[in-house]
Image: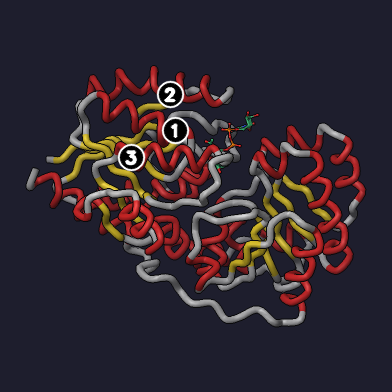
Amino acid sequence: MMKIIAVAGTRPNFVKIAPLMAAFAKHPAIEAMLVHTGQHYDARMSEVFFQQLGIPEPDINLGVGSGTHAEQMGKIMMAFEPVVTEHRPDVVVVVGDVNSTIACGIVAVRAGVKLAHVEAGLRSGDRAMPEEINRLMTDAISDYLFCSEPAGVENLRAEGHADERVIFVGNVMIDTLLKNREKAEASDVLDRMNVHAGEYAVLTLHRPSNVDDQAVLGNLLDVLDVIQKDMPIIFPVHPRTRNNLLAGPLGQRAGEMSNLKMVEPAGYLDFLKMMASARLVLTDSGGIQEETTILKVPCLTLRENTERPITAEVGSNQIVGTDPATILAAYRLIMEGKSRSPETPPLWDGHAAERVAKILVEKLAVR
Ligand code: UD1
């Protein structure tokens, strides 16, 4: 039996770990444990994803919660180390690019345990993003680098990683989307939000560079004010954004926009339904760029760069930054029906997690 400890800590991690845990459970040669770091802890950011995606109850919850980066990573490392020492897995599997990813990765490698990184090789080129540093560091110490798109493979090769460690498997987040798409269709969220399919926008914002900077946030509100006059905007507000936006003077301005519907963070199925039926999506998230590509819904990414270039090359995504004129120009083209028809990226086929399971068993058996 191959013993795996899989790690998840934040909302997007849960969406990625769900198909991996399912694939591990199905594989006769794998015994897997799940560790939740507790980086995200609100029911709406965590529990609801476990329920809706059928993720098994974590075997261990490290319960670390929020803090500065150093506090958060320090607490995760201190809590995860005894877990690795006690259970001695053959491999630790980490996903994505959050603080939980790198903190658990370092602990595994220091304990002499193999490390597998799922969603390896993505690079925005922007070292001011905490996630970029997490990605670089995690990949640098990983034994198995599972890539979601061709750019990931190219980046890792350019950084000198040996070919046999770099494996293109496709996108586990899309495994989850394809599996739940039908179930999400049944959600009555549009009625609850009082909007009609194809006649509203969805917005998410949580990147520190957008929501921690009042000038940038002010620019984005200028844009939203224009769009909300055309159609309702559903805005499920991330806790970081709630703390920074609603607390300040800009919160009052946002509150006065009658068609900007600020709501609690949505569960997975409601959010998938909201995206799938939207006229367009505005976001600074990574995963949403990928999900809208598969849903073929136009996506405007409110960032200067992306670590997921395939979504803009073949998908429905456009990187528009935070300058109001640029965002609104792209918005108007979408409204005129001038967006190109997106394609599906290679291997985003619903079977990425099964490939990870199979390859891990093969690789570790020939060790
Ligand atoms: C983290 C990830 C980010 C990812 C995002 C997805 C890092 C460095 N960042 O950002 O890459 O895109 O998750 O959501 O790992 N809070 C709550 N309840 C919670 C969790 C957080 O209220 O359940 C609040 C706290 O005030 C906390 C703040 O949100 O201080 C930020 O949380 P944190 O985990 O530090 O980072 P995120 O912004 O969520």
The span from disc 1 to disc 3 (Cα, nearest Å) is 16 Å
What's the colour scheme? secondary structure
- Mark 1 vs mark 3: which is more N-terminal? 1
Q: Which corner quadrant of the image does residue 322 belong to?
A: bottom right
Q: Secondary structure at mark 1?
A: helix
Horizontal and vertical percent position of residue 159: 34, 49
Horizontal and vertical percent position of residue 275: 62, 63
Horizontal and vertical percent position of residue 189: 67, 59
Find ligand 1 in the image and state its quadrant.
Answer: top right
**Residue shown at 69%/57% (left/top)?**
321
Residue that badge 3 annotates: 140
Contact, CB < 8 Å: mark 1 with mark 3? no
Q: Secondary structure at mark 3?
A: helix
Question: Which one is in front, 351 or 126?
Answer: 126
Q: Residues within 10 Å of mark 3 (few under 14, many from 20)?
A: some
**Residue shown at 47%/38% (left/top)?**
133
Q: Residue extending furthest left?
A: 366
The yes-or-no answer for disc 1 within 8 Å of ligand 1 is: yes
Viewed as shown, does residue 326 lie left or right of 1? right
Residue that badge 1 annotates: 100
The span from disc 2 to disc 1 (Cα, nearest Å) is 7 Å
